[in-house]
Amino acid sequence: MPFLTFLSRLRSDRSGGVLIFTGIGFVSLVGAAGLAVDTAQWYLWRRQLQQAVDAGARAGALSLIQRDGYESSARREIGRNADNTLNVTIERVSSPPGSGGFTGDTGAVEVIASTRQSLPFSSVFIDLAPEIRSRAVATRVSDGEYCVIALAPTGIGVRAIGTADVNLGCGVGANSGIQAAIDLTGTSWIDAPSFHAVGGIDASAKNIPADAELQPYGVPITDPLLSRELKVPAKTEGESCIKNYSNQPKDNVTLSPGRYCGGMTLKGVTNLSPGVYILDGGVLDVASSASLIGDGVTFIMTGSGAGNAASAKIVGGATLDLTAPTGAQNPTWKNILFYQDPIGSSSESTFAGGAELDLTGVIYMPNGDVRFTGNSGQSAECLLLVANHVTFAGTSKLNNNCTTDYAELDLSASVVKVVE
């Protein structure tokens, strides 16, 4: 019985066992590799989808701030960021969010999207591909305190030139939308914890600290004094105007608040009584030999028409010791040291005092440009600059160690971030 003999021999023959187990192991290896490839693809799609909904939520929240169509912006950004091979289904774009910890935030945008696609290997084993689903919520959050703010929407907002060496205890912000909204050139240095711009920030490691936070292409900073609706006091009937006031290097005089027309030229020692000094046209010209001293004073700079407001020219070497009024001294002009009428000026205001430049208060020139040039040793414990454009040159130290009287000023900037 040859066939039975063959079966008996086959049963006792073990030489093919390795081949059988090798075949089984190879099939398992191929299956594991196929599953790993599909799992990696699902993970990649998950990352791409999350990136797309994050971008969509940020775009939507930014459009809310700009009072634009947030839903269309979010959908457009999702489409732009999603991989072309993804078949994305946008399930929700809503404000305020319908779930999570920001359901009451009318400035927040929630985006939920999903995708479901079959892959060659896993489709052999499962009838329905797994759903990949991602969610994101973005809203406006505070981004620190800023004591140097350039309000102009165009041009270089904040510039540091030459060998400028500026030490700030607060952030630097610019509302300009150009590529170099904040521009630090050469060996200039600004030591600040944060830099915020609507446009770009042009600075290298030799211009700013390594740990400084940079926020280019951010949200415009709100003018911290806009809500106070400050206005130049109107000239009353019978009010006198001191024209082209000046004094000499040997003079030691005391001035009273009032309206000064055609500017002021100060060369000697000038003591200012507390109150408001209205400069109607001309220039506040403080010479290098001069000393200007005053507590509880405000300079209001105005003029006869657009671009004609008075400006300041403080020459290096001058001694300035000026403090703005407190709320108790003058509720209307509290904290304001220099205020330039929004009609603006064609001339840049320059503050170039030496080591004896001690200013406490706010320099507020919403449509005027300011150049601040200090010398070695110059320091101010509470000086805030809010102007159209700001330029730094020389060595200065400006801090925002202000009293609680300044607490009502909102000096914060905002950024749109994904929070969920």
Image: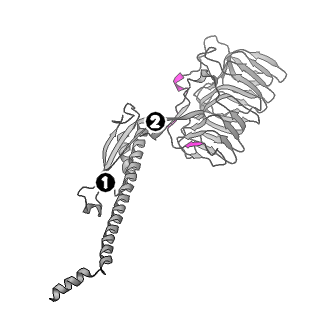
Residue 162, quarter of picture: top right
Q: Residue 278: tell me if it is visible.
A: no
Q: Quadrant of the N terminus?
A: bottom left
Q: Nearer the viewer, residue 419 or 197?
A: 419
Determine if the magenta segment contains residue 404.
no
Residue 120, quarter of picture: bottom left
- In the rendered structure, which amino acid carries the disc numbered 1? Asn
Image: 203 above or below 266 = below
Which residue is outermost to the bottom? 2
Q: Residue 352: tell me if it is visible.
A: yes
Q: Earlier in the sequence, mark 2 or mark 1?
A: 1
Secondary structure beneath dot 2 equals: strand
Q: Which residues are magenta?
A: 206-228
Give residue 264's position: percent from left, percent from top. Answer: 73, 23
Give residue 78's position: percent from left, percent from top. Answer: 37, 48
Q: Nearer the viewer, residue 103 or 314?
A: 103
Give residue 116's position: percent from left, percent from top. Answer: 29, 53
Image: 382 above or below 93 = above
- Position of 412 with respect to 296 (left or right) is left
The residue under label 1 is 87
Cα separation, mark 2 vs mark 1, equals: 30 Å
- Position of 1 with respect to 22 (left or right) is left
Q: Quadrant of the C terminus?
A: top left
Residue at 32 percent across and 49 percent down: it is 114
Q: Main secondary structure of the magenta part?
A: loop
Circle 2 residues within 10 Å: few <14, some 14–19, many ≥20: many
- In the rendered structure, which amino acid carries the disc numbered 2? Arg
Q: Are marks 2 and 1 in contact (CB under 8 Å)?
A: no
Secondary structure beneath dot 1 equals: loop
The residue under label 2 is 140
Residue at 41 percent across and 34 percent down: it is 107
- Position of 151 with respect to 35 (left or right) is right
